Image (tube, grey):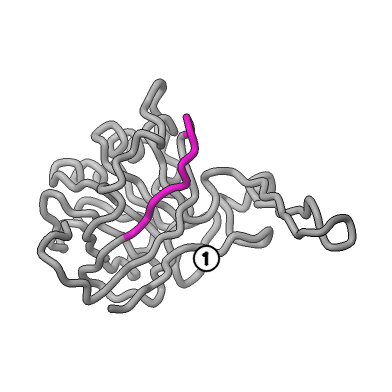
Amino acid sequence: MKIFDISMEIHYDMPVYKGREFKRPVITTDSDFVSGSVYESRLNMNLHGGTHIDAPLHTIENGETLDNLPLEKVVTRCKVLDFANVEDKITEDHLKSKNIVQGDFVLLKTKSSFLDLEKDFIYLDKTGAQYLKEKGVKGVGIDSLGIERDQPGHPTHNTLLGSEIIILEGLRLKDIEEGEYFLVAAPIKIRGVEASPVRAILLSELKGENLK
């Protein structure tokens, strides 16, 4: 079995959504060995920074919060789909070229993994989201800082989240080949929020009939 870490590293100079300064994480020291007997740090960050999961509340008023997420939705088999040659957005036509079936959790690999794009990252457009909804997938991940960019009304988010389809953003898929893996992407257990950072990993060569 091989373990692939597909998470972003959290630090002040990391790529953030559209390069917005207020979204940068800030780590400060609460206590060190000069001021006390232990070392303790504090992290102040937007919950949509780095590798994270969106819950329906993110774009849907009165939507579900992340603490209601069944973990079997994010500890599951998945498929990495390579779209590294796509220049702007992933559409229905792009997705039709891949083998996607009901119940899949698909991870979209784009050039964002290679270039750390902040503003002009590759995104999934509304036709692609609708196609995945019709296919009956249970989750969609992408290596961009957001699954959506500059679409009025957030149709990609609303189509997916409104159908209880997981959205996982900010993956690092540069060294991951297209294929099937086992995904572990459990969020931090925070009550009543619309998003949470995750430490996402992929496992290969994992065997066992009881794993779904």
**Magenta-span inclusion, residue 183:** no
Q: Residue at x 14, y 42 (%)?
A: 134
| Residue 145 placement (x, y as % from top left) | 48, 54
Up-down: is 65 above or below 130? above
Which range of residues does the magenta coloring cover?
A: 184-193
Provide the residue designation for mark 1.
116
User: Which residue lies at the image location 54% right of the left edge and 43% below the top edge?
Assistant: 47
Quarter of the picture containing the N terminus is bottom left
View extreme (top): residue: 62
Report the number of numbered marks: 1
- The image quadrant of residue 104 is bottom left
Q: For mark 1, give the secondary structure.
A: loop
Q: Residue furthest right?
A: 34
Q: Nearer the viewer, residue 171 or 111?
A: 171
Residue 29 on image: x %, y %: 78, 54
For this view, does 33 lie left or right of residue 53? right
As drawn, 197 above or below 133: below
Q: Nearer the viewer, residue 34 or 181?
A: 34
Task: Say which amino acid is labelled 1.
Answer: Asp
Q: Residues within 10 Å of mark 1 (few under 14, many from 20)?
A: some
Look at the image and tell me in which quarter the C terminus lies: bottom left
**Residue lying at 39% horizontally and 69% vertically, measured from the top left:** 173
Q: 72 or 93, which is in the foreground?
A: 72
Q: Percent x, y for residue 36?
A: 85, 56
Q: Position of residue 146 (x, y in %)?
A: 45, 49
